[in-house]
Each structure stands twice: as C-alpha cells, then as structure tokens.
Image (cartoon, grey):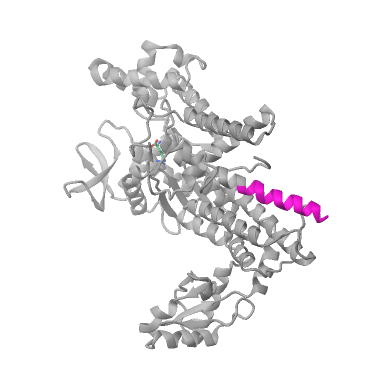
Amino acid sequence: MLSTAETLKQRFQQAAKAAYGLDDVDPVLVEATRPEFGDFQYNAALGMAKTVGAAPRAIAEKIVSYLQLNDVSEPPTVAGPGFINVRLKTDYLEKSLARVYADDRLGIATATPERIVTDFSSPNVAKEMHVGHLRSTIIGDSIARILEFLGYDVLRINHIGDWGTQFGMLIGYLREAYPDALTKSEAVDLSGLVNLYKQAKARFDEDPDFQEEARLEVVKLQSEMPDSIQAWKLLCAQSRRAFEEIYRILDVKLIERGESFYNDHLSAVVTDLDGKGLLSESDGALCVFVEGFTNKDGGPLPLIVQKSDGGYNYSTTDLAAIRYRVDVDKARKLIYVVDAGQRDHFEHVFAVARLAGWAAPPVELQHVPFGLVQGADGKKLKTRSGDTIRLQDLLDEAVQRARDLLDSRLAEEGRDESDEWRASTARIVGIAAVKYADLSQNRVSDYVFSFDKMLALQGNTAPYMLYAYVRVQGIYRKAADAAGMASTLSTATFHLAEPQERTLARHLLDLDDILAKISTDYLPNRLCQYLFELSQKFNQFYENCPVLGAQADVRASRLALCDLTARTLKLGLSLLGIPTVDRL
Ligand code: ARG
C-alpha cells in the first residue's frame, strides 16, 4: 500500500507531466505548517518557473487543473506565490485507517528483499566493552530491526577486534605471569583479563626484551603454532562470555565474524591492489594514495595496507571484509554503525575499495556515525575514579534504580506486587530506559548520560512510553469488555468527526513514511519522536472524545482508534528493541 505522501507525490508528478511534459520534476511535498492550510503543501511550482518560463502561480494553477486527487483530497487550492494546499478527505482517511487496522503489519509494505550487511557492536577481545560499543549495539540493533521489518535480508555482523599484534604481547605476558589463563577456560574472567592486559602493556612499554618476546609471539600466532592458537582461542572465549552476557541482557542478536575471520583474505587485498597498479611503497610500507586525502600538512595521505614488518592492519582487514561482504555475502548495502571518531578511517577505506572496483554501484558503503556519551561534566563518561565504565555495571545500575523507583511508587499507591513481578518489570524498564535515552537522541550528537532523566515518568523517556502503552491498551481492553466487544477485532469502520480524531488518524497513518525515512538516513530518533507525538495526540483525543459514552458506531470507531494506537506503540517500541508490559 502506498503511503499518503507517496500517493500524493505520484499524482503530482503525473499532473506536472500532463501539464508540461516534464518527467523529472522533484515533487517537493511538505506537511502543512498549520491546520487551516490543510494537510500537505506541494511547492514544486516555484522551482519550475525557470524551466517552464511562467510565473509560479500560473504554473501551480495549471498543475491543479490536471491533478486527479478526487479519491484522496478535497479540491486543492493555490496559495501565496504558488503553493498548492491539499486537504485530505475524511473518507480517504477513514478507508486508509480501516486498511491499516486489518493488517498485521499495520499497512507497512515490504521492500524487495535485498541483502544489507550491518556491522555494529564490534568490541575488542581482552578489553571491556565501553559505552561507545553500547551505543553501536543499541543503534545498530534498532536499525537492523527496522530494516528486517521492512523486508530486507539483514546480516548482523559483529566485527570483533580479535586479532593483531596486541595478542603477542598478551600471550607473552601471560606465559610468564599467569599461564593458567592460557590453558584453563575458567581461570580468568574479562575484568581479570583486562587487568592482565594493562600489566602486559605497561611491561611492553618499558622492557625492550619483552618487546622482542612479544614480537616472536606474534610470529608464532601468525604461523598458527598450535599452542599459540589454543591460547588465543581461550582469550577470545573468555571475552566472548562477557560480551554474550551483555547481548543477552540487551536482547541483541549478532553473528560473530571478528577480524581474524579475514586472515586468509588479507594477502589477496594487497596482491589485487598491486595488480591494479594502485600500490606504492612508502618507508617500506605498502600503501594506496587516493586523490583528495591529505594529512595535516596538506601532503598526500597514504592508506597503509601492509606494514614494513609484513603485518597487516585494521584498514586491510576492513578492505578484505568489504570484498567478502560484496562477493560472498552478495550484499547490496554495507552499513557501519561505528563512532564518529572513525569517520576518516571509513572514508579512506571506502575510497580505496571504490577505486579498486570492489564496491562498484549499485553497492553502497555507508558509515553511520554517532557521537559521544558524556557524563554530567560534559566530558566522556567515566567512573568517579576516572576509569572506563563497565557496561555490565551500568546496566545493573539502571535496573537497580528502576527497581527503587518502582518500589517507592508501589508503596505510594499502596499496591502489593510480587517480588518476581517487581524484578522482571524493573529489568524491562531499566534496560528500556538506557536504550530509549540513546535512541531518542539524534545519533550524530553527543548526549549527556543521566539515570534520573532516562528513568523519569515524564518527558520523552522509556517509562513514559511504556506507561502510555499500558494506559492506551488498558482503556481499550476495559472499554471493549464493557461494550461487549471482542478484544481483538480484525475489521473496523472508522468515523472521524472531531478534530482530535482526525489529528490522531493522520499521525497513525504516518508510520510507514517514518520507517521509510529511517531506512535511508538511519536515524531511529525519528521513530522515538513519532511514538512520543503519537501518545500525546492520543491523550488529546482521549480527553476530548468520550469512548464508552458515545453512540454505537462512534464508540466502535473510537475503540478501534485506541486499539490501533496501542498496536502502533507496541510495534514501534519493538523496532527500538523495547518490549512492552501489560501493567506498570
Ligand atoms: N573494534 C572496533 C573498535 O572497537 C570497531 C570495529 C568497527 N567495525 C569495522 N568494520 N571496522 O573501535
């Protein structure tokens, strides 16, 4: 089913063609800024004046005379210098609502199932996942959920940092300091490992003999000596346990394909670049120069693909990954949800991949950057002692705080609820609060992490949204029972009489446009804003339009509006990775 905006754009394009024979008029369609202007405004006439050689107002009038919108809108009117105002017919809204209502997917069409690789989360072995990885995980998961719902074939790839020279250093250090960690899987947890890693690094920085030892360990690992490989696998497994626990709490699914996955494909990257004449040598390293990429002094900036010691690096792996995703996975789009600090890296790697012809159109490579999570002081979020915050601790604290707030609210309301219910509700609310706080921000900006704000019952927060769902659904359930109606109707006839009903209806019909936008700009905050406004519009409707007290046909229509609002909230939240609850 075409969305209203899409339908209008199509009709306007047809009219512009009929009037002027123009095929490529950009259908500039915006939401009307005030209700008295109608619902939409078409502004393309202004831009056509030059091509057509007429005044915009005359153009607008001519387009209107060719417009066929009878089934959708009242007769369009021309305003000001050449705007065309469109007011949707109530009958059109009512029919559209009925169609959406009868559909499990709420009228959202499915796309052609092309394959999209989403690369997100991607923490590093022997290091704690930090809040940057949390943002990547939450935003990446929501984008993947939305694309999946839209019908794309999404691969969720966890590009874990599980390879590199640091493993030589770590294994070398553990051989001396804590050999158990290399042979016994339960010997050390991730925090233990992180500490050992820090010690290894300190040793590496001050002891030249150890540096040589670490280098030899790297060689052993790269030549796949069995005990080195076994030690490395164990370190990865220890980290994986901790990562998987976080994914379980967040309900995020990922396929692990770490950097090591591409080891056998790295030399081909270099050989192929060489074969294409793209390789140069600089200080013993092999690199690619791409026009337009310069260093601070304005000189050409190389992308190094093989270091002078023969080792490969982060960029080489990303190039190999692009080739694999395009050639083997057959992906049409590659999306990287990675912090904005890596913008230059991705621009450079993408440029080389395109130059080498590894990502020729229609393949699209897209870095989806996000900003920092800041503490109250506006600086990068840290613990009080200045350490990186452990994600597990952060999530635990969110749940604990949600629990405290829940307990005190229940005490105030004099409600008696089981411990089990309290625990599971606090878990849902706490995690939802963390996710929603992140997703409701435009991802590009930095945001200040505040438990108080994200757990507040008022404002654009998860608790507010969960509460809105409980309330709307409760109204519907009770009212439907009282009216002797089955709780889930499959069909409904809508009658929109009051302005608040119309406003709510318009909003309910906008979901597919919102999702379509997110599928191209990857901004899930659009969906948060949409849901927030939906609950506000519902409240205005509910305050002004009696449901149970209304006449039978109006009552049925209003009940269906309640039901559709609840279903829309539930679907929308699920696309943000947030489950709903039936009471709070
Ligand atoms: N492991 C990297 C980090 O922690 C992120 C990897 C992102 N994905 C990629 N294909 N480079 O910074």
Residue under the point 39% across and 15% down: 174
Residue under the point 41% across and 53% down: 359
Quarter of image, res 165: top left
Residue under the point 44% across and 86% down: 59
Left or right, 48 with respect to 107, comes to left
Q: Is residue 190 above or below residue 370?
A: above
Res. 345 in view: yes
**Residue closer to the observer: 377 or 288:** 377
Residue under the point 39% across and 49% down: 444
On the rendering, which quadrant does ligand 1 occupy?
A: top left
Q: What's the magenta region?
A: 468-485
Image location (x, y in percent) of residue 395: 51, 32
Q: How many marks?
A: 0
Res. 262 in view: no
Main secondary structure type of the part rendered in magenta:
helix
Q: Is residue 162 above or below residue 32?
A: above
Q: Is residue 17 above or below residue 212?
A: below
Image location (x, y in percent) of residue 285: 24, 37
Left or right, 500 with respect to 331, comes to right
